[in-house]
């Protein structure tokens, strides 16, 4: 019996819109649908090539004027926390982690709203309602988990308040931190750093070599923190490489660093989609 698998993914480009990371820049994204029986294989393959997942879509920046958004991942075997990161772990030692299937709750959304209002009030997610939030969490065609972090009750009660959440994909070579948010009042405790460090430990325990952090953007204060993690690799010039000195990547903001869209698509390696036989 012959089973016909889906045709090769089709890639599209979004219309330009203001860049959320660099001033006076416009962003556009190259994207493809993530669906069907090959969704996990495609997610695994394109994540290794700088793509990120958003619900049922895989995307990668394909801006006309720069290539500053560089996918970043931590090499788990070589990672060593810095002194300040160890302090962050100690400051958040009261947190307990629980991973579950991707299911949105009102408590998550309430925390999400506090996080956005405090840190990203003018961002693209600022107007997201609870239904859109639920779609972000629950619409996933791949292996995903919601990782929640709760703190000790302040009033001696039984309910442990939710203080951090991360939507995490499980790839064949690592964990991809799709989106995370946390209690703004715990910013001084570096709870966001703690969530990343904890994902490194989860990956280590699972025997997975990488933790994918999303995009590191040279020159962007919002994304600069990712360069503080050791054993960090970036996807640049179609290959993963050690980040080295962050200042060495400023040329990626130059218009001449951009390849035509057709060339970018031609260089994408797709997983085997040939028909299979029983």
Image (cartoon, rainbow, N blue to C red):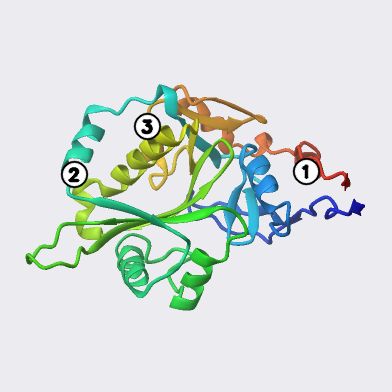
The answer to whether 120 appears left or right of 142 in the picture is: left
Element under label 3? Answer: loop
- Counting other residues with Cα less than 10 Å from the Cα at mark 2, is it few (<14), some (14-19), or many (20 or more)? few
Do tag 2 and tag 3 residues touch (Cβ < 8 Å)? Answer: no
Element under label 2? Answer: loop
Rounded to the nearest whole Å, what is the CA distance between mark 2 and mark 3?
20 Å
| Foreground: disc 2 or disc 3 | 2
The first of marks 1 and 3 along the sequence is: 3
Q: Position of residue 245 (x, y in %)?
A: 44, 23
Q: Is residue 25 above or below residue 240?
A: below
| Front-lying residue, 277 or 107 | 277
Residue placed at 24% from the left, 46% from the top?
Answer: 190
The first of marks 1 and 2 along the sequence is: 2
Place residue 116 in its image quadrant: bottom left
Residue placed at 47% from the left, 32% from the top?
Answer: 207
Q: Position of residue 224 (x, y in %)?
A: 39, 40
Work out whether residue 247 can be spotted.
yes
The answer to whether 45 appears left or right of 104 in the picture is: right
Residue placed at 29% from the left, 63% from the top?
Answer: 118
Q: Which residue is mark 1?
A: 265
Q: Position of residue 77 (x, y in %)?
A: 43, 24
Rounded to the nearest whole Å, what is the CA distance between mark 1 and mark 3?
30 Å
Q: Position of residue 267 (x, y in %)?
A: 77, 36
- Counting other residues with Cα less than 10 Å from the Cα at mark 3, is it few (<14), some (14-19), or many (20 or more)? some
The answer to whether 136 appears left or right of 117 in the picture is: right
The answer to whether 160 appears left or right of 145 in the picture is: left
Q: Is residue 143 above or below residue 108?
A: above
Q: Which residue is mark 2?
A: 93
Residue placed at 30% from the left, 51% from the top?
Answer: 97
The first of marks 2 and 3 along the sequence is: 2
Q: Which residue is mark 3?
A: 229
Work out whether residue 62 can be spotted.
no
């Amino acid at each position: 019996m012959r089973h016909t698998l889906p045709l090769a993914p089709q890639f599209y480009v979004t219309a330009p819109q203001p860049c959320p990371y660099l001033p006076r820049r416009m962003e556009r994204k190259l994207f493809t649908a993530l669906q069907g029986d090959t969704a996990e294989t495609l997610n695994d393959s394109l994540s290794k090539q700088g793509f990120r997942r958003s619900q049922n879509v895989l995307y990668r920046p394909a801006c006309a004027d720069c290539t500053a958004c560089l996918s970043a991942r931590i090499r788990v075997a070589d990672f060593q926390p810095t002194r300040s990161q160890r302090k962050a772990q100690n400051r958040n030692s009261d947190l307990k982690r629980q991973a579950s299937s991707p299911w949105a709750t009102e408590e998550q959304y309430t925390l999400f709203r506090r996080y956005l209002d405090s840190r990203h009030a003018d961002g693209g997610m600022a107007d997201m309602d609870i239904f859109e939030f639920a779609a972000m969490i629950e619409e996933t065609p791949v292996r995903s988990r919601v990782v929640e972090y709760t703190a000790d009750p302040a009033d001696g009660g039984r309910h442990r308040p939710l203080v951090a959440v991360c939507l995490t994909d499980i790839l064949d070579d690592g964990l991809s931190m799709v989106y995370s948010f946390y209690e703004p009042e715990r910013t001084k405790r570096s709870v966001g750093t703690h969530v990343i460090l904890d994902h490194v430990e989860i990956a280590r325990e699972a025997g997975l070599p990488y933790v994918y952090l999303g995009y590191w953007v040279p020159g962007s204060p919002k994304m600069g923190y990712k360069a503080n993690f050791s054993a960090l690799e970036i996807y640049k010039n179609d290959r993963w490489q050690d980040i080295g000195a962050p200042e060495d990547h400023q040329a990626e903001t130059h218009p001449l660093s951009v390849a035509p869209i057709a060339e970018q698509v031609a260089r994408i390696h797709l997983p085997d989609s040939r028909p299979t036989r029983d």
